[in-house]
Amino acid sequence: MIRPRDMRLPRRVVASRQAGFVLCGAALWALCSSARATPPEAASAPQALQTVTVQGMAYGAQAVHLPSTATVLDRERLVQGQQQVNLSETLNQVPGVVVNNRQDYAQDMQLSIRGFGADSPFGVQGVQMSLDGVPLTMPDGQGQSQLIDLPMIGAIKIIRGPFAALYGNSAGGVIEAYTEDAPDPAAASLAAWLGPWGSRQSTLIGGARSGDLGAVAGLSDFRTDGWREHASASRQQFNTVLRWGDGGDDRYRLVFNALDQQGLDPGGQTLAEYQANPRGVAASSLSYDTRKSVRARQSGLSWEHRFDAADTLQLSAYGGSRSITQYLAFSGSFAQSAGGVVALDDAFGGTRATYSHQGLLASRPYTLAAGLDYGRENEFRKGYVNDLGTQGALRNDQYNVVDNTAVFAQADWKLTPALSLSGGLRHDRVAFESTPGADAPLASGTGGTARYAATDPVLGLLYKLDAANRVYADWGRGFVTPTFYQLAYRPGNQPGLNLGLQPMHLNNRELGWRVDFGRLRAQAALYDITADNQIVVDTNTGGRTTYMNAGSTRRYGTELSLDARLPGHLQASAGFSLMHIRFVGGPYDGASMPGAPQEQAYAALTWRPLLSSLALRGFYTRISLLGRSHVYVDSSNHATPAAGWVALNWAAGVEQRRGPWKLSEFLRVDNLADRGYVGAVVVNSSSNQYYEGAPGRAFSAGASITREF
């Protein structure tokens, strides 16, 4: 029997926050005295921490260390004891990052960084994403996270703060994923796991190195019947990376990714529907058989040439295609409607050229990188009547084009051995154009153009207090244009694109501190961001979403993270973020932004004993919790918010090795306390179907076998 979810703020949320702070405090108390007495080199010798916090990002051939809030999750943190299906499994460890699993594979994960992208009903908006240097974010700013195939990923870097603007449009943050390096010696592995509701995944990965040539490839297959009704899905992926020339003056990398995904769309629920049956689905979703299919292919080639020790040139090009067919929860046959079936066929591509130079200025070292980006997306968009789950008459036919041209430069100058000055400048020009097809009923007057441009500077200082402590301060402007999805529909059921929508301009300030004692690593950041022309959801009906500019927003907050090695073979991790986002002026003046929790806390404790038994070698067990405060579901804050919650998870695994063979097994329990809560929200739903429930207690188990050659 499904229990009604309690929409009140539960006491366990308070308990989760207290638990996170207790864990942080215990680790600090246990380690600070010994860490300060131990040189960093000696302290870090026994074992590397799972999470590596970096000082900046490399925006060119050479690494340029910048004052920035950035975190790297290594492979162990990404895959060990995880199902390796969704980014929601791992990225919520990072303060300021919120990833919601909707239990709806027709809509992708709901991913946001410091609130940017929190109200996205589909895909990722406001955040730049890439895989092995190939953009997953289209030139219009719309991104898809499904191409990040977690079983193959070696590391993910998450960048917050002003310097994210140097990556271009969608300057709310950056997520860079990197495929694991080719193994040496050659190896092949087969992995599989089983879970509830018919959920399972199998993965085959192989790779090898020979001289300066390395290759790795993987194939994965995921299927689920879905926790909710009308929520079954399947996903097949293939990814490969070929590298050659490592160690020489010329290095090459060839990347190819493929995705096929199909998913039924259960949509959101009203509060009454959710409380009566969280696993249910609206009658309209069943009547119109709401669903989505995605087919994506993309590839990229990069060449890096080192002229000498000081000068490097990097050239890259990418291209791909994406086809989407989505059935919405209405017919789309009325007056000015563009249809209840959306069919998109996209072709996209781009190039990047970067030149970097290292030298001395006033006898102090500096690094300078400059270059240009170009990206183009061609979208063929058609709309048809949804005739109760079958494609009907043509309603809309558009050819849409977006071009994004940018030039950029950035520099890092070490003023003293302890003080570094970093800065950059990026200029973007983004042009949208829509041309209606002559055969569509809505052809007349539905075309048009929109052009946006911005020049965004960033500046920062990094100061080394001592060998373990660093503080930084940075400031910058940013740029977030509407995406084609946000432009797709005009308010009031009018035909054509919403070309009156204006881009957001950000003013971003940040202060940060990080410490690395080897056994203890911690990071803290304070930020203050204002955004003009805030883009928000205007109406959301059955998957058809319109957008508007709603004045400005101000967001400020703090982020804290901790990783520590404790006595008794224990490792602790904790993260906390406090985020305030308020509308300033406009129709929602003073209200909080929907979709973004004010508080999020994460804590984990892992035990890895040193066991001599061959059957138990590599054993670990981990207990973790994730808690959030309540979330507003509408911009006016009038509807009942989704209550805060905390989920407790447990995982354990073991490994056996014999000669060239390695066998690993894991067991996982999510939502150990079987709590009921809203896992994601549909912002500004016109039918009040805001709530998407999360499953109760769920068991999963898996194993992998690896053979070295």
Image (cartoon, rainbow, N blue to C red):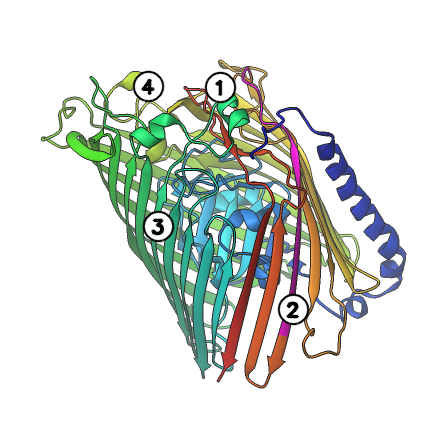
Kind of residue sitting beneath label 4: Pro
Task: Name the residue located 82 percent from the left edge and 52 percent from the top edge.
Answer: 27
User: Marks 1 and 2, how far apart in space?
Assistant: 54 Å
How packed mark 1 is, by other alpha carbons closer than 10 Å (few <14, some 14-19, many 20 or more), is: some
How packed mark 2 is, by other alpha carbons closer than 10 Å (few <14, some 14-19, many 20 or more), is: some
Kind of residue sitting beneath label 2: Val
How packed mark 4 is, by other alpha carbons closer than 10 Å (few <14, some 14-19, many 20 or more), is: some
- Viewed as shown, does residue 557 lie left or right of 98? right
User: Marks 2 and 3, how far apart in space?
Assistant: 32 Å
- What element does badge 3 sit on? strand
- Disc nearer the start of the sequence (1/4): 4
Residue that label 4 marks: 491
- Disc nearer the start of the sequence (1/3): 3
Residue that label 1 marks: 551
Residue that label 3 marks: 261
Q: Position of residue 221 (x, y in %)?
A: 40, 59
Query: Do the CB atoms of the residues marked 1 and 4 lie less than 8 Å apart?
Result: no
Which of pointers 2 and 3 indicates the residue nearer the eye?
2
Kind of residue sitting beneath label 1: Gly
- Disc nearer the start of the sequence (1/2): 1
Residue 582 occupies which quadrant of the picture?
top right
User: Marks 1 and 4, how far apart in space?
Assistant: 17 Å
User: Marks 1 and 3, how far apart in space?
Assistant: 37 Å
Q: Which residues are magenta?
A: 638-655
Residue that label 2 marks: 654
Which of pointers 2 and 4 indicates the residue nearer the eye?
2
